Amino acid sequence: MLSQVSFAQGTAPVAAAQQLPNYGGLSATAYYMLLTVITMELVVILFLAFSIRRMYTELLPEKIKPKPQGSKLADWWSKLDKKLFTKAVAVEKEADILLDHDYDGIRELDNALPPWWKYGFYITIGVAFVYLLNFHVLGTGLNPTEEYNAEMEKARIAIEKYEAGNKDRIDEKNVPMADAAGIEAGRRLFEANCIACHLKDGGGSVGPNLTDNYWIHKGSINDIYNTIKIGYPDKGMQSWSGQFTPKEISFLASYIKKLVGTKPAVGKEQQGEFYVDGPVTDSASVKKTDSLSAKKPDSVLVAKPDSAGVNK
């Protein structure tokens, strides 16, 4: 055992990490050495037990069995108590088990161990052998790291199974457009929580205008859902995931999408990048189109008078 401890102390952390599947285990040599020592101890214990029993049988006088007294239930309990629980000796019989040890007038009785404790000890020996075989010889047992990984995999499979059968599953990658009732629920949520920053008609005050096609954090319904869910505290937008359920956030995102294209009383200036649902989503393309439409007419198309005063 000392050699095993010295070996463990001298092992580098990298080597220990590589031996992770044998976490807490023993090598084959150490196991068989331990098994040999335990077997020898058991043989010695059994030999001593039989020897002591034989000496008691030879030295002590034969006990006279007392006649049963009392009710059958009391006799049954007395026998059960002696065999399984205490194996007690009656007070009048204590002289038979009194040892010659004397400690300042205190005498010692040679009482037997309680049977329940003795049998429990035998069971723990059997469990120890099963444990050694399971974890250190056959390798069928899982170490704590393997048990953790197995539990995490089991939980992952359970979550996937649940989400596959959950028709109302909503996240930032899967936000359906709400129906009329959902949009109405979104409107109530918006008016109860969002008008302080975006105004009731969505025109924007502290927060941006929600009625135009310019978005600071993109404008698809999935992006709007994500913005409401996680928030942007650095820009004054809090996270609403603690107040609203995923379903309620999807209703709110659907209502905000319905605000796009409406005419607020006072609309805040455009912020962010241009976005529309459809083929034209590139802000660079939109800006290019806007710049072309605002370009001055080509000079060759402008009539210019010649020296004679005639337009060409």
Image (cartoon, rainbow, N blue to C red):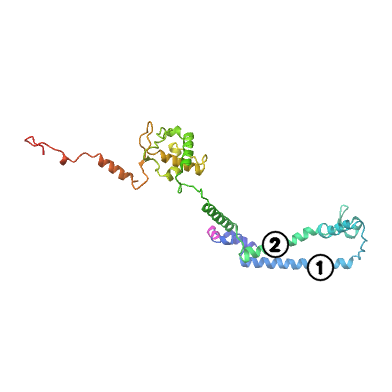
Q: Dividing the picture into quarters, in which one does residue 214 lie?
A: top left
The residue that appears at 69% across and 68% down in the rendered structure is 36
Q: In this image, 178 relative to 65: left or right?
A: left
Which residue is tagged 1?
Answer: 50
Q: How many marks?
A: 2
Q: Secondary structure at mark 1?
A: helix
110 shown above or below 58: above
- Residue 257, given in percent of the width and then of the height, sits at 41, 41
CA distance separating discs 2 and 1: 24 Å
Q: Residues within 10 Å of mark 2 (few under 14, many from 20)?
A: few
- Residue 166, given in percent of the width and then of the height, sits at 52, 50
Considering depth in this image, is 118 or 281 the residue closer to the camera? 281
Which of discs 2 and 1 lies nearer the camera? The answer is 2
Which residue is tagged 2?
Answer: 127
- Residue 59, given in percent of the width and then of the height, sits at 89, 66
Q: In this image, 146 relative to 104: left or right?
A: left
Q: Which image quarter is the N terminus in? A: bottom right
Q: Dividing the picture into quarters, in which one does residue 224 lie?
A: top left
First to last magenta residue range: 13-17
Considering depth in this image, is 163 or 111 the residue closer to the camera? 163
Compare marks 2 and 1 and give the one earlier in the sequence.
Answer: 1
Tag 2: residue type?
A: Val
Residue furthest left in the image: 308
